[in-house]
Amino acid sequence: MRRPVLVIMAAGMGSRYGGQKQLDPVDPQGHIIMDFSIYDAMQAGFEEIIFIIKRDTEKEFREKIGDRIARHVKVHYVFQGINDLPEGFTVPEGRVKPWGTGHAVLSCIYQTEAPIAVINADDYYGKQAFSLIYQYLTTHQDDEKYRYMMVGYELGKTLTDNGHVSRGICTMDADGCLTDICERTHIEKRGDAAVYLEEDGKTYKELPLDATVSMNMWGFSNSILDELQARFPGFLEQGIAKDPLKCEYFLPSVVAELLEEGKAAVSVCRTPDQWYGVTYREDKPVVVEAVGRMKQEGLYPEEFLK
């Protein structure tokens, strides 16, 4: 079995945050959130990383993180571009938005044949999550179904006080396997509760704070790349017709299709860890305080990955 590779999605525009949030330091030593994820991944056993970035940020990305990380693990780059479409498709006039997480991961199709762990660049996942995903990917292989896994978080531990977020709301069976995942693109805190905005844009419904959600931390066999490629044209046909400027090819949506078709089984490994992220600029002080506290507790050294 090939050793799993860590895939980090770092091509996001950061529009709500303002600027390249993935490269913004969160401690006095200049570490960014990705540093903590990479450090935790290395501790878990990962030795190779694929960064998904935009071509126009490559120089800054290499200077601020890539060249430094390459001193510790093997590093590759792939590029997510809005014009990277199958034959017969063109970018709708006026569209500037990337095509989503499914399209991002599809960028890796010619880079690796190994199992992959997929994470967001701007999320802090916690140490346990990387141990769980590495252990799964090194002990499971596809059989009559694709054998995937997802690290699940408690919804209440993934919300921000500063606006709405997108989360994949998960349903599991008695064995802890994913049966459904529904992408909610507008979830916000309301006092001690969480609510999401329905598709009509007017109605809110409550969600339990202990609901299991996806934070886009997935473990896949390499089969996911072929499935993403095969399904992308169908998504484009429907998505462009319905919402040409904003439709997105969501990774969880593809997983949901595979579950419905009986082609995949997804084990959900829940972690009690608190998620931290910088969806909005106002989130940064919370992350900075958390990082300082974790360092004081000895979870991270003052200096690492230098």
Image (spheres, grey):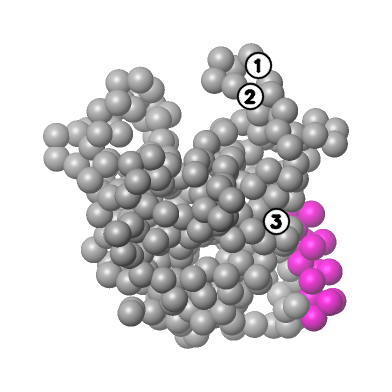
Q: 108 and 142: which one is in front? A: 142
Label 3 crowd bin: few (<14), some (14–19), many (20+), radius 10 Å: many
Q: Quick check: 62 above or below 70?
A: above
Question: Which amino acid, mark 3?
Answer: Tyr
- In percent of width and height, residue 118 lies at 46, 60
In the picture of the structure, the residue carrying the numbered disc 2 is: 197
Determine which residue is flagged by label 3.
276
Q: Earlier in the sequence, mark 1 or mark 3?
A: 1
Mark number for residue 203?
A: 1
Q: Are marks 1 and 3 in contact (CB under 8 Å)?
A: no
Q: Main secondary structure of the magenta part?
A: helix
Per the rendered image, the range of residues in magenta is: 283-298
Residue at x-position 34% and y-position 58%: 146
Dot 2: within a 10 Å radius of its alpha carbon, few (fewer than 14), some, or many (20 or more) residues?
A: some
Circles 2 and 3, Cβ within 8 Å, touching? The answer is no
For the residues labelled 1 and 3, the Cα–Cα distance comes to 28 Å
> Is there CB contact under 8 Å for labels 1 and 2?
yes
